[in-house]
Image: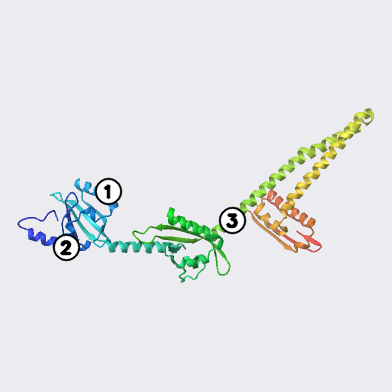
Amino acid sequence: MPGRLPEGEGKEHYRLLFERATDGIWLADREGRFVDMNPAACAMLGYAREEHLRLSVSDVIREEEAPRLRDLMRELAAGHQITDIWEIRRADGTYVSLELSHAFTPDSLWQAIGRDITERGRAEAALRESEERFAVEAADLGRWELVPETGEFYTSATCNRHLGLPEDSRPTHEEHFQTIHPDDHAMIYERLRRAVEEEGEFEAEYRVIYPDGGVRRILSRARVLRSPGSAPDRLTGITLDVTEARELEEERERARARELTVLTEAAERERISRKLHDRVAHGLGVAHQSLELFSVLSQSDPERAQEKLALAKQTTRRALDQTRALSAELKRLQEEELAEGLNGAFGRLAGSYVPDGIEMDVSFSGEESAIPASVGMQAYLAVREAIRNALKHSGCSRVRSRSRFETGTSTA
């Protein structure tokens, strides 16, 4: 409709079109006061025409939409035509979604022609939810929803599986919590409380105990959906089984710890090697030189010869003490390597001494308890040295070691 209904010829024709249009048609002045509307518009909002005419546009939109209405009026005054969607309040207080086409008429009236798209919006929302649900389930993500005020709880089949429950079960909130490790309850309750009262976002990783005693690690994330009016808020979220991922991370940490241990041991051995060279070897060199001088001077200068002999004895004694101390340090390092037994020590060889790209196959068999500690230590050191030499000198791509211990004998 171009504006007010025409006068004179054609008035009845235009009025008939206006009255019978299935779309709602509203006319308002520049202050937003309604001056006319057709029966379809009255039916959409549930007002009698006389009641509708006592209202203005600001009476039927949400209060927070007032700035948007002012922007719309400025755009229309500039000659633009705009089509958009508004939430309009009906006479019963509910809201309806209207797709409205706005324009200013030649006689400066705001004209809006609209259709009810509430059902279309609901269908689109349902489609989005269906697509999101499909994507969630395809990614092995469980869906759940909780109404904190009432305790109502919904879980999808995948979520139930993550919790160790039958997929077709409908657990209550309390039944859900019974599957969670007791030590994690306080943490989860605190994060739920914080999400509802403060942050609006929930995230927790917790342990779930399965009926067979197995333990799985579950990551759960959710957001709080604030409901209008008196309706209770709810949390809607997803669950993901992260057990294998966490086990992989822990194995990487253990491998890293082993690597650091090997580096530490290598550094310690390097330190001991330097001590052997700088102290013990130097002391033995001094003792050897003193003994040679003693032989030379024993006839020509007996007094100096005795001094050289005393120095040789002193440096030899010091070198002996240093050798014993360093031997004790080496023994301590070897005992640490064997702290978990020969089987564990042979197993760690594969992860400790072999660089990436080289296959390592180490096996041990036999009754370890029957092996004297000294024998076990020597066998381990022999195998370790053999592996080191193979890696250092052979240029091999695979190292294989088989050790079998029998009572009274050892074979490596």
Q: Residues within 10 Å of mark 1 (few under 14, many from 20)?
A: few
Q: Nearer the viewer, residue 66 or 262?
A: 66
Q: Position of residue 20 (x, y in %)?
A: 14, 63
What residue does disc 1 label? 67
Identify the amino acid type marked 2.
Answer: Pro
Q: Which residue is mark 2?
A: 39
Query: SS of the residue at dot 1?
Result: helix
Please tell me which of labels 3 and 1 falls first in the chain.
1
Q: Quadrant of the N terminus?
A: bottom left
Which mark, residue 347?
none
Mark 3 surroundings within 10 Å by alpha-carbon count, few (fewer than 14), some (14 through 19), many (20 or more): few
Name the residue at 64% across, 50% down: 259
Residue type at mark 1: give it.
Pro
How packed mark 2 is, by other alpha carbons closer than 10 Å (few <14, some 14-19, many 20 or more), is some
Discs 2/3, front: 2
Please name whichever residue, 348 or 185, is drawn nearer the observer in this view of the structure. 185
Q: Earlier in the sequence, mark 1 or mark 2?
A: 2
Residue 184 quadrant:
bottom right
In the orientation shown, which residue stands out farthest toward the top? 300
Q: Residue at x 45, y 56 (%)?
A: 195
Residue at image mark 3: 250
**Residue drawn at (79%, 57%) of the image:** 375
Residue 378, quarter of picture:
bottom right
Mark earlier in primary sequence (2, 3): 2
Spatial separation of the CA atoms under disc 3 and disc 1: 54 Å
